[in-house]
Amino acid sequence: MTYPMHGTEYLTRRLKAHRYRLGLPPSYVAKALDISVEDLEQYEYGRKPLATETLIKLANLYQVSPSYFLGGLPVN
């Protein structure tokens, strides 16, 4: 399953905001996920569909539940 670009403003906003909150540079996240920095930026700006597998990897790296990115409770 992938999360399409349309209607994903909430998802993409949380992806980018949480990376900033953790102080992780795009290069670090991209390397940890074995993707390019360009792909990460495309996900964060909603220009490329995000596969469920990638969302789970991001959640694990950011130490949150995948549901956080899909509208779950905010992280304190």
Image (tube, rainbow, N blue to C red):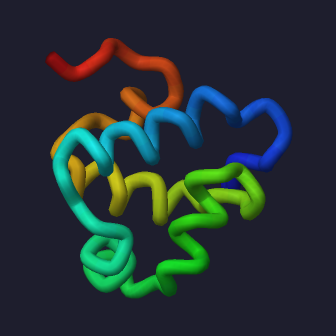
In the image: residue 73, left or right of residue 5: left
Residue situated in front as seen by the camera: 59 or 25: 25
Count of marks overlaid on the render: 0
Where is the C terminus found, in terms of image quarters? top left
- The structure residue drawn at horizontal position 18% and vertical position 47%, both measured from the top left corner, is 22
Image quadrant where residue 24 sits = bottom left
- The structure residue drawn at horizontal position 33% and vertical position 13%, both measured from the top left corner, is 73
- Decide: is 25 above or below 68: below
Image quadrant where residue 32 sits = bottom left
Image quadrant where residue 51 sits = bottom right
In the image: residue 64, left or right of residue 38: left
In the image: residue 34, left or right of residue 51: left
- The structure residue drawn at horizontal position 19% and vertical position 53%, both measured from the top left corner, is 23
- The structure residue drawn at horizontal position 63% and vertical position 58%, both measured from the top left corner, is 50
In the image: residue 39, left or right of residue 9: left
Measuring from the top left, give residue 68's x and y in whole percent: 37, 28
Residue that sits furthest to the right in the current view: 6
Where is the N terminus found, in terms of image quarters? bottom right
- Decide: is 58 above or below 65: below
Measuring from the top left, give residue 13's x and y in whole percent: 54, 35
- Decide: is 7 above or below 57: above
